[in-house]
Amino acid sequence: MTRRMRTGTVVLIAALCAASACAGPGAPIGPRIPREGGGSLGGSAAGVLAFLVQPRDVAAGSPIGEEVKVEALDTLGNVLTAFSGTVGMTLGSNPSNGTLSGTTSVAASSGVAFFDTLVISKAGSGYTLVASAPGFGSVVSAPFTVSGASGAAAGTP
């Protein structure tokens, strides 16, 4: 004898299935959630990277103000506090052909990598940084401006 299920029961079963990864091992749970700086949850088996602190506008040749911070997250958006791997930083968008110097590769501490000595050599608008780590892929920062000595952004040559 079959019995009709109520709508509430079906919704509950679907929610429990999603929470327990009925979709199979390694499948992302729920929708892809956008993260600051262009990363998204559900990116790889290890997790994803996200900018906790985005780069700020800065003068050419000066360290980027408030240190840039990148965190390693699991597929649910929780910080992977056991992660102590190396996170690298490179230039993404490079409108004025500048160079990135300072410490561009650091070991994470409790899942967070701190970049406090990053310097870009040339003024320009629309620079981005790209953070990456083995097993995590990469994430692109929000665009920022590097101003010239006078405090005004230089035009692209």
Image: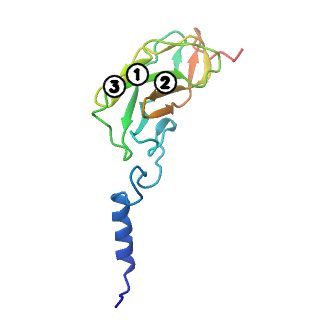
Tell me the SS state at disc 1.
Answer: loop
Q: Which mark is residue 56?
A: 2
Residue type (three-letter) at the residue carrying disc 2 = Arg
Quadrant location of the N terminus?
A: bottom left
Three-letter amino acid code at the position of disc 1 = Glu
Q: Earlier in the sequence, mark 3 or mark 2?
A: 2
Kindly report the distance in space between the C-alpha atoms of the residues bearing marks 3 and 1. 17 Å
Work out how far the residue at label 3 is from the one at label 2, CA to CA, in angstroms: 21 Å
Q: Residue at x 38, y 71 (%)?
A: 11
Q: Pointer 3: what residue?
A: 108
Say which label, 3 or 1, has the lower sequence index: 1
Image position, residue 31 (x, y; %): 46, 54
In this view, 30 is above or below 120: below
The x and y percentages for residue 67 are 40, 21
| 129 is higher (above) or lower (below) than 31 | above
Q: Residues within 10 Å of mark 2 (few under 14, many from 20)?
A: some
| Mark whose residue sits in front, 3 or 1 | 3
Between the C-alphas of marks 2 and 1, the distance is 7 Å
Q: Nearer the viewer, residue 57 or 91?
A: 91
Q: Secondary structure at mark 2?
A: loop
The residue labelled by disc 1 is 66
First reached walking from the N terminus: tag 2 or tag 1: 2
Question: Residue at position x 48%, y 24% from top?
Answer: 56
Quarter of the image holding residue 106? top left
Q: Position of residue 3 (x, y in %)?
A: 35, 87
